[in-house]
Structures are given as structure tokens and as C-alpha cells.
């Protein structure tokens, strides 16, 4: 009976595990930044230490060979969905705080809902719409709060945070589209390869060659954890979830991440919001609760590897 329950809810369980693994990113990034590590440096090695396990994964399972055209498309998406995304996330943490980055990334459900409706014909009921509008109100309040750092509002930090939400949302669309043809591990391997390429070039362009910075062992450990635990393992569970549940359900359910992420960062680094920031965060969490208890069924197209 317990096994059947687990199997029937494997998609939901997988996306919750994904959210838990992702929740440590803000804390680990904040830790590396506290040692003076450049945000682009952090982004590259998170991507690199996530790519290497996927490469070995695909070599062992012999799933790395795909048509050159498709590999190129996934590689190019990796430049946007990985390279740009990881860089913007690090700069949002630096400019406006880890809590701000966590919340603004979770404007992603708006984009996911739009993508799901346009491309996969997933229905949007009135409860879903109310939840999305509630989250929109919360996002505005968070932006107006000035971030989770005690300094003044940083417009660039807010803009970069909002863009991370769009980057993040695009992962749901691309993963669902390509899972009909390839295993998730293959998709993520080529995406991360594109991300590594883009981030390496950006580091060189910004006159911060990766070989010049000698981080401590603890920084290397944090970077490795960001790559293996928060990227490789998280994407494995993410791929399992996207195959089994609707895009909207996955996007909303994964919002366990900001709750846990804010808890880790506030606990360790004592970051906090202004009252309007906390009110906005509460609105976003309420929107998640509305969708979680919704009885409306969301149709979706199931894809197979």
C-alpha cells in the first residue's frame, strides 16, 4: 500500500525533493560571496560541477549521442537557461540579498502558466488565476521593500531577480518539449555544457580568469555541493517530476524552495525583510497554498523518453 502511494505520487514527491535540494543554493552562494568570490566565478563552477556528473551519467548509460542539430539547440538554450540564469542569480544575491533572489525567482509560475496554456493547453481555473494574482501582489511588495539587505533599494538587483524568474520558467517548457525524445539526463548535459561555455567566456571578458583566483578548501567544497547536490541531483528529480505532473503543478509545488531558502539564509546570516517585504512573501506563500488545496484538475500532455 505504501509503495503504491509512493508510485502514484512520484511526480509530486520528486518536485518536492527538487525544491529541498535547490533551497540550499542561496545559503551556499552567500557563503562563497562572503569569502569575496566573484559571482561569475561561483556561477561557472556551479555549472561545471553539475555538468561533469551528467557527462559521466550519459557516457555510462550511452545516451550522449544525439543528432548534431538537436545537440546544438540544447547547447544554445544552455547559454540562456544556464549561463544567463546562474549569473543573474548571483548578482541578485550580491546586490539585493539572497532572500530577494529567492522570492523574485519565483515569479516563474506566471511564465510557466502562460507557457503551459499556450503550448500544452493546460487549463487555468479561477483558483489558479486568484493564486497567480495574489503572488503578483506579493512580488510587487517584495520589490518595493528594497530587498533583504539593510541598504537602500537596488533597481539593478530587482531587475536581475525578475529576469531569473523568466530564465527559470523556460526550463519547464524546454524540458517538457524534449523529454518526448531524450532522457532528462541527456537534455541537462547539453544545457549545462552550453552554460559552462557561456560562463567561461564571460569570466574571460570581464578580466577575471578562473585560474587566477585560489579559493579555500571550504569554498571548493561549497562550489562542489552547489554543482553535485543542488544541480545534478536536483535536475535528476526535476526531470522525473516534469514527466509525471503538469507544468503548473510542478512550478507551484516546487515553491517549497523559497520557504526553506529564506529559513536557511535568515538563520545563518540574519537577513530579513521590511514589513512590506514579509507581507509580499506571505502573499506568495498563500498563492502556493491556494493551488495546493485546489480540487481543479489540470490536464497535461504526458511525454515519454
Image: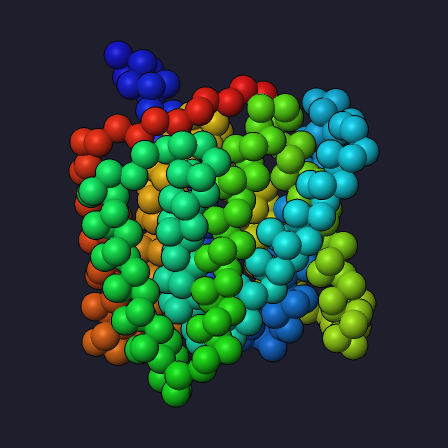
Vertical relation: 144 (above or below) 165: below
* Image-based side of 273 in relation to 189, left or right: left
Q: Quadrant of residue 107?
A: bottom left
On the image, the x and y values in percent for residue 257 come to 37, 51
Question: Which of these two is toward me, 118 or 302?
Answer: 118
* Image-based side of 122 in relation to 67, left or right: left
Q: Quadrant of residue 216?
A: bottom right
Vertical relation: 281 (above or below) 269: above
Label count reads 0
On the image, the x and y values in percent for residue 241 come to 44, 31
* Image-based side of 88 in relation to 66, left or right: left
Vertical relation: 212 (above or below) 69: below
* Residue pictured at 20% horizontal, 53% vertical: 286
Question: Which of these two is toward me, 42 or 132?
Answer: 132
Its colouring scheme is rainbow
The C terminus, quarter of image: top right
On the image, the x and y values in percent for residue 264 come to 36, 61
* Residue pictured at 71% horizontal, 41% vertical: 73
* Residue pictured at 74% horizontal, 68% vertical: 203
Q: Is residue 229 visible?
A: no
Q: Quadrant of residue 97?
A: bottom left
* Residue pictured at 40% horizontal, 63% vertical: 104
Q: Is residue 91 visible?
A: yes
On the image, the x and y values in percent for residue 292 come to 23, 40
Residue at the farthest bottom position? 152
The N terminus, quarter of image: top left
Question: Which of these two is toward me, 89 or 27?
Answer: 89
Amino acid at each position: 500500500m505504501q509503495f503504491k502511494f509512493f508510485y502514484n505520487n512520484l511526480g509530486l514527491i520528486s518536485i518536492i525533493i527538487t525544491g529541498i535540494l535547490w533551497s540550499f543554493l542561496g545559503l551556499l552562494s552567500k557563503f562563497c560571496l562572503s569569502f569575496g568570490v566573484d559571482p561569475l566565478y561561483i556561477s561557472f563552477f556551479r555549472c561545471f560541477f553539475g555538468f561533469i556528473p551528467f557527462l559521466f551519467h550519459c557516457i555510462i548509460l550511452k545516451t550522449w549521442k544525439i543528432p548534431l542539430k538537436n545537440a546544438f539547440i540544447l547547447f544554445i538554450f544552455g547559454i540562456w537557461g544556464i549561463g544567463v540564469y546562474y549569473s543573474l542569480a548571483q548578482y541578485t544575491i550580491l546586490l539585493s540579498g539572497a532572500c530577494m533572489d529567492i522570492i523574485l525567482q519565483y515569479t516563474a509560475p506566471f511564465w510557466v502558466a502562460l507557457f503551459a496554456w499556450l503550448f500544452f493547453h493546460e487549463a487555468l481555473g479561477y483558483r489558479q488565476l486568484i493564486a497567480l494574482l495574489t503572488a503578483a501582489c506579493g512580488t510587487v511588495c517584495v520589490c518595493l521593500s528594497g530587498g533583504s539587505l539593510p541598504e537602500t533599494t537596488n533597481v539593478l538587483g530587482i531587475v536581475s531577480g525578475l529576469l531569473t524568474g523568466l530564465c527559470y520558467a523556460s526550463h519547464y517548457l524546454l524540458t517538457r518539449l524534449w523529454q518526448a525524445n531524450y532522457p532528462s539526463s541527456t537534455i541537462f548535459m547539453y544545457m549545462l555544457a552550453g552554460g559552462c561555455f557561456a560562463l567561461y567566456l564571460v569570466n574571460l571578458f570581464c578580466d577575471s580568469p578562473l585560474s587566477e583566483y585560489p579559493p579555500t578548501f571550504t569554498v571548493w567544497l561549497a562550489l562542489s555541493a552547489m554543482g553535485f547536490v543542488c544541480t545534478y541531483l536536483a535536475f535528476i528529480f526535476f526531470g522525473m517530476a516534469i514527466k509525471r505532473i503538469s507544468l503548473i503543478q510542478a512550478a507551484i509545488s516546487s515553491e517549497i524552495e523559497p520557504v526553506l531558502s529564506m529559513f536557511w539564509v535568515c538563520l545563518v546570516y540574519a537577513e530579513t525583510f521590511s514589513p512590506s517585504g514579509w507581507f509580499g512573501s506571505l502573499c506568495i506563500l498563500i498563492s502556493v497554498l491556494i493551488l495546493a488545496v485546489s480540487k481543479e484538475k489540470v490536464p497535461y500532455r504526458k511525454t515519454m523518453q
